[in-house]
Each structure stands twice: as structure tokens, then as C-alpha cells.
Image (cartoon, rainbow, N blue to C red):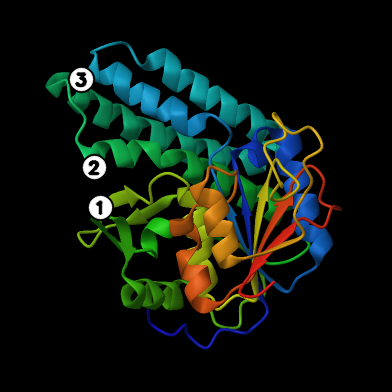
Amino acid sequence: MQSPKNWPKDWIVHKFGGTSVADAACFRRVADIVEARAEPRQAIVLSACRGVTDALFSVVATAEAQGETAGELAALRKRHSDIAEELLSSNEAAPYLAALDADLDDIKGVLQTIKLTRSAAPSARDLIAGYGEIWSSRLFARFLDAQGKRAVQWCDARTVLVVDWGPLGPAVDWRESQSNLSRALASDFQGALVITGFVASDRRGAQTTLGRNGSDFSASIFGVLLDAAEINIWTDVEGVLSADPRRVPDATVIDQLSYNEAMELAYFGAKVLHPQTMAPAVKRGTPIWIKSTFAPERPGTLICAAP
């Protein structure tokens, strides 16, 4: 793993999952959280809006079955256009909607090929599945920028992260990814860097994904690339629980865990970070906080080298 560029040591990474950006009210809540923390340099990694990635996989399956995909695509457009029109002025929403329509036209072209062959190549499936994060992050960046409180830059992770897929999953090309980020981001940037989770590119430049839990992995990777002081994973639970609350009603949030303890809990099925997604942060010794978007005042769970 290459040493990070000499970035300032005050970068903080925040990752928000699909439930955290499910609708316009959720987008506002996320903006309130990051604005309230008043950190000079924030990297904000977003998942797709809740259910969108599954909907995109469904569109691919429909095309493979030679079904009609127009209705599914129209529903995806309406979902995002409704959020955009609620969050942005008409002038601010117009370029976002134009980009959304261009993306949907690209998807239609890929779907036509899938219909003809009755089979989706992995590259085509990855291409389509990754649009959810592009749409959510692009929208959030426009919304945050419209607040006018600080500089906002959108980062398309497909132009930064380079990975090789192997038997054990995606392996990051740290040298190339670091070089790409150095070109994309000024070293003295202050403000919010809004990043697409889940997506990356392979060595040929073709779009790919980081697999399941990919946005958590994105947060961990960018934490290393930026030499971040900490990573915050915002989700719909208040931290790592001592037991499954469906079976143990009085389960409590664990204040602090070591990396090894968190990995053991994940192995036994606890709702916590997947070991692979934690690996880059663990190697760098970056603390990880698990917190709730819906109860940001709660302390959450700290995962670090030595509790």
C-alpha cells in the first residue's frame, strides 16, 4: 500500500448508507449532520438511495428475460426527480435532471444489447448497478453546494479508484488510485468532497464495482488515500449491538471494540462492518465510528486498534 500524498491531517470521512439517503428529508438530515460537525475537510461517501441498486439489478434481469424495462426506468427517474425538485430550485435541478436523463439513455442502450443476447455480461451488470451512487452523490453535492456555506466538490470514484478483481474480490491499485486522487483534488482544498460509493474502474478504464458492502469499502479506501483522522459509518442503528435485538430485547450498544473483536462479531453474523471493508483502515490504524443518521446525538461505537 503506497503512502498517502502529504494531505492535511484533518480529513474526516463520513459514509452514509442507503437508508440515510432514502428521500428528500433524509438528504436534509445528512446535510444537517455534516454541517453541524464543522470539520474543515470532509469526505462524504454516499450509497445509492434505498432500494435503487436492487431496482437496477431488476432492470437487468427484466432485459435478460426480454421484458419491457421502460416502466422500471421511468420509476427510477421519478424517484430521483422528485427528490431533486424538492431539494433544489428549478434552475439548480435542471442540470441534474439533464445528466440523469443522459444516464438513463446510456442505460437503455446497454439494456438493448442485453435483450438481444438474453444475457448480461458482468461488465454490463456492473455498469448499470453503479448508477445509483452516481445519482445520489451528484444530487447531494448540488444540494450541499446550494446552501452556500463552503466549497463543495463532487468526486466520481470511477475516475479515481482502480481495482483488479480476483478470487478474493477487488484489490486496490493504491499507487494508481493515489495518483488519480492527487490530480483530481487540490492538496489545500477545504470543504466537502462528495464521493460516489460502490463504484470504481478496472485497469482498462471500464466501470466496475466493489461488490457487496462496497460503499463501506469505498469509505475505508478513501480514508487511506486521504490519510484521514477517522472514518464515520452512518447507518440506521446506533452502533454495534451486544446481541440481536429481535432475540434479545434489552441488547445494548457496545461503546468500543478492537478491530479483531469487530471482525469476530462480523464472522458470527453481527450487523457490523464486513472484515474486507475494514481492511484498509485496519492496516492504517484509522479509527472507525459506527453511528446512527437518525440519532446523531448518540455516541455510537468506536472500532480501533486497542479498546
In the figure, residue 236 lies in which quadrant? top right
Marks 2 and 1: CB-CB under 8 Å?
yes
Q: Earlier in the sequence, mark 1 or mark 3?
A: 3
In the image, residue 145 sits, relative to residue 98, either above or below, namely below
**x%, y% of residue 250?**
82, 37
Residue 264 visible in the shown view = yes
Instruction: Decide which of 234, 41 is in the foreground and name it.
Output: 234
What residue is drawn where x is 29% and y is 36%? Answer: 125
User: Looking at numbered disc 3 in the image, what kind of residue is underneath it?
Assistant: Lys
Identify the residue under disc 3: 115
Query: As displayed, is residue 31 above or below residue 226?
Result: above
Q: Amino acid at mark 2?
A: Ser
Residue of label 2: 123
Residue 157's disc number: none
The N terminus - image quarter: bottom left
Task: From the image, tell me which residue sits under label 1.
Answer: 206
